Image (tube, rainbow, N blue to C red):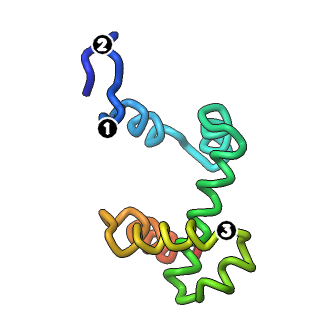
Amino acid sequence: MAAPGSRIGKKQKNDDFYKAILLLKDEAECYSFFCDVCTQTELRAMEQRFEVARLLTQGMVYSDILERTGASSATISRVARSLNDSSGGYDRVFERMKNNGKL
């Protein structure tokens, strides 16, 4: 992590940001935090990518996902690549959601 007061480089992540997310207690706090951190456009884009990933993992085809979500074919392809070349983030979350009856 960057030294205090130093500027964060383009490729460097801010660990404190991710630690802060882990401190959120419920959906309302999470929504409030992300509304403060992101523009509405950024938030909708993340929500859309999440929905596309969920539908892809359920086996839905691109054309149906495009129609259902309004996502561009480029976005759907990007999400599909991220699912195939992922660090397991989507899979982990979807598995936990499934185990908790939320998927």
Residue highlighted by disc 2: 4
State which tag comes first along the sequence, 3 or 2. 2
Residue at left 48%, top 67%? 78
As measured in the structure, the alpha-carbon distance from the residue carrying label 3 to the one carrying label 1 is 27 Å
- Residue 100 visible, this orientation: no
- Per the rendering, the mark at residue 11 is 1
As measured in the structure, the alpha-carbon distance from the residue carrying label 2 to the one carrying label 1 is 17 Å
As drawn, 71 above or below 42: below
Residue type pointed to by label 1 = Lys
- Per the rendering, the mark at residue 24 is none
Residue type pointed to by label 3 = Ala
Q: Position of residue 44 (x, y in %)?
A: 68, 53
Q: Position of residue 4 (x, y in %)?
A: 30, 13
Left or right of residue 19, residue 63 in this image: right
Residue at left 54%, top 85%? 58
Residue highlighted by disc 3: 71
SS at mark 2? loop
Residue type pointed to by label 2 = Pro
As drawn, 37 above or below 68: above
> Mark 2: few, some, or many residues within 10 Å (few <14, many ≥20)?
few
Residue at left 51%, top 70%? 97
State which tag comes first along the sequence, 2 or 1. 2
